[in-house]
Amino acid sequence: MRIFKLTIKLITTISAIIIVCIIVFFSREFISNYSVRFNMDNIQLPGKDSKVLIFSPHNDDETLGAGEFIKKSLKNGAKVKVVLVTNGDGFKSALQLDYFNLFPKENDFIKFGYTRQQESINALSQLRLSKNNIIFLGCPDGGIAHLWSSNWDNSNPYKSNFTQSNRSPYSNSYTKNAIYSGESLVSDITKIIDEYKPDYIVMPHPNDRHPDHWAVNAFVQYTLTYINYTPKKIWLYLVHRGDWPTPLKRNTSFYLVPPKKLTGIGTNWYALDLNNNEINEKSKVLQSYRTQFRTLKPLITAFERKNELFGECPNPTIEKFEKSDIKITAEKQNEIITDPLQDTLSLEISRDADISHIYAEISKENNLHIFLQTDLNIDKFTSYNINMILFNKGKISKFSIKFKDKKLMLRHNSSIPITTTYGGIKYSVYSGFIHITIPYKDTGNFDHMFINASTSIENHTLDKTARKMVNAI
């Protein structure tokens, strides 16, 4: 009998331990989530008569990232305009599922684009934003990064893989028959900002992995610098970052917190808290994007959380004239970009292609020093690319530098308004660093530098940093 009682007691104890372990295991994520949220500040909403301009790459991003921000800003008496950069017409799998059209033609994609426009109109009307405050640019879905990197000039437009057009085929585009080029997109953004003069700009985060998203950020940053316009505040929202938000499903008891890899590397994160009614309201508004739900429901509903998330990335200022050429090294005070390490599976294997930092400094001799640092040694099979745009009172110079196997190559993608020079660039390689020196005669007295870096093997990109605008004034 005593043995039986001891056995029961042992089983009870073991069961209790197992239950406690299960509770601890599942509460760990909950505790971590709440801890991160309470270390973030609350966002300050725009006040009465403030002007807010929101850039959305696709029809739904404006609500995923900033739906309640829009409604609360309007409630505060602010004015809000939303710019839909593309019409999301290239989401082929959604078109096939919703319309049972396995082989859609060009006109099917255009019709789908109009449908997605109406979804945004319906959703935003529920947030009290009128149709008159929605601007459709009609840019190519899936093509914004191409406009940035390959199809800048009007003379070399991008052709949509879906509508098969190199101009906007939409009758309600901000610029009728707008050319699919970087030049044309900058022109549209410039006109909108000049006419509206926003106090607040809301746009995608530069570390968003979707090419349309990071490219929209790049175009807006470029335009603001080019026209010398500084809003009161720029807020950034994140939509695409691997399996984020975690867990990738609806969870209204969780906060929307930044990915761990994007904390502590240059973004200050803020929260706009939502009560239960506001969460349910956002959920209802998101259902207006009917064409997206069959394929993207886990991602869309994962934004139905206890807050909306916004980032702020202050521009660093480059170190100038403190040291001579021979004394400049990569160090904390001249660090301008910190990139997450091992944020993809391939980078866990290819550590020599994993960029960790970019450093920049101008010497007493007025030469520009750039350092690229990787997680391991520089590899002879990997291409290391540094892309810079230098702004100097309306004049623009672009340097695209490719380094591979101790060879330095210079490239350019555009003739207007970007020019490229080629003389006198020096380099050195040591450990996990590439040190490039660009002489003053090639850079001039620039005011700002827009820079990023990437690594690749045989045209397959392995790592890519966010683009950073660096002040040099």
Image: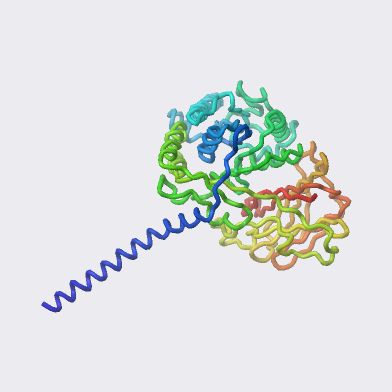
Side of 90 where 466 appears, left or right: right
Above or below, 177 relative to 336: above
Above or below, 2 relative to 83: below
The residue lying at 52 percent from left, 44 percent from top is 272
Residue 31: x and y, percent? 43, 58
Q: Residue furthest front?
A: 48
> In the image shown, does 96 or 342 lie closer to the viewer?
342
Q: Locate residue 239: give its quadrant.
A: top right
Residue 412: x and y, percent? 77, 44
> In the image shown, does 85 or 47 lie closer to the viewer?
47
**Picture quarter with the N terminus:** bottom left
> In the image shown, does 393 or 326 lie closer to the viewer?
393
Side of 328 where 265 appears, left or right: left
The residue lying at 50 percent from left, 27 percent from top is 125
Q: Residue furthest bottom?
A: 2
> In the image shown, does 108 or 32 lie closer to the viewer?
32
Residue 407: x and y, percent? 77, 58
